[in-house]
Image (cartoon, rainbow, N blue to C red):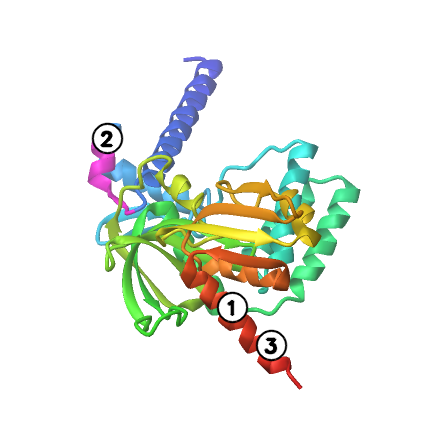
Amino acid sequence: MTRDDDADDRYAGKRDRTARLTRLVAILQAHPEGIRTAEVAERVGMSVRTVYRDLQALERELGLPLWADDGRWGVDQEKAFLPPLKLTQSEAMAVVLAARLMVRYADKYDPDLAAAFEKLEQGLPPALAAHVERTLDVLSKAPRDERFSGHVRRLTKAWAERRVVTLEYEPARYAAHDAPRTAVVHPYLIEPSLQTHALYLIGWDETREALRTFKIERIRDVGLTTRTFEPPEAGTLEASLTRAWDIIADQPPTEIDLRFAPSVAARVAETTWHPTQQTELEADGSLRWRGTIAGTIEIRLWILSWGDTVEVLQPAALRDDVATTLRRASDRYAV
């Protein structure tokens, strides 16, 4: 055998090993709950000993964060890096603007958002990088909440791995029966709210047998179970969210009918506030606004923000609620 043949054999061996390791990583990522070495060996047609040796190589040589528990191996998704993104300058700017919007509405320091900004900054032209650096300065001054950040990470892990979670939850007291409770939830989505500047978990609540919305700040504890769940049918969650005014989509559809004063009619008409809205300009210059919304909890705050320039026509319960609130406000300011 010639020296060139030896070199070719060594190259082929390295190529085969690289292919094995790449496939092993793909198998581990496809099994977030973990997989036994015997199952991997059977799938790739190799010995258990070789699979075990390759797992050690992934840890020691490539630094891939693996975990092992009761004979099962998996990738620690919280510590593993995602594949690098190759962004054009315009695409990077779009990401910067999206993250800037989140920073403007965030009321807490988010270490993961800060780390993402720092990595994004490295590949940007100086002008854009300086913009990101200023954003990091603003973010660094926000208060820190380690418990909140830990809950977000754990829920993100459960969302990514489709793991069922248990929540110790303390809801807002909209009604007398809204007491602290334990919920078993399929995490479908984590969504920011522009109205409350908060993060929400939207998912199927096994305890209530219904889709529910959980404000993450009100979650007292998060537990990851070993159970997994099937995602909702494609398009159903998005259709449900279109009924929400902001985040809450788990309330019954409610017909809203409002009349805005002529002084604000043009301002109201120039914006699409909800996908279902219908507007009609009346003879006196006022604007009739109609829409079908999931409940009245969120739109109530929007209505009150217009003060005396809006009148609730329907539903009657919302009209009475707004009228009572405004009377209380008037009494508070009375001399």
| Neighbour tally class for label 1: few under 14, some 14-19, many 20 plus, Cα within 10 Å | some
Q: Who is closer to the viewer here, 63 or 335?
A: 335
* Image x and y of residue 52, in percent: 29, 42
* Number of marks: 3
Q: CA distance from mark 1 to mark 2?
A: 67 Å
Q: Quadrant of the C terminus?
A: bottom right
Q: In the rendered structure, which amino acid carries the disc numbered 1?
A: Ala
Residue that label 2 marks = 43
Residue lying at 49% horizontally and 51% vertically, measured from the top left: 257
Q: CA distance from mark 2 to mark 3?
A: 73 Å
* Image x and y of residue 132, in percent: 71, 50
Residue that label 1 marks = 323
| Secondary structure mostly taken by the magenta-highlighted segment of the chain | helix
Q: In the rendered structure, which amino acid carries the disc numbered 2?
A: Arg
Which residue is outermost to the bottom? 335
Q: Is residue 38 magenta?
A: yes
Q: In the rendered structure, which amino acid carries the disc numbered 3?
A: Ser
Q: Which residues are magenta?
A: 33-43
Residue that label 3 marks = 330
For marks 1 and 2 on the same chain, the one whose residue lies earlier in the sequence: 2
Q: Is residue 255 magenta?
A: no
Residue lying at 70% horizontally and 34% vertically, measured from the top left: 89
- Side (left or right) of 171 relative to 139: left
Which residue is outermost to the front? 283
For marks 2 and 3 on the same chain, the one whose residue lies earlier in the sequence: 2
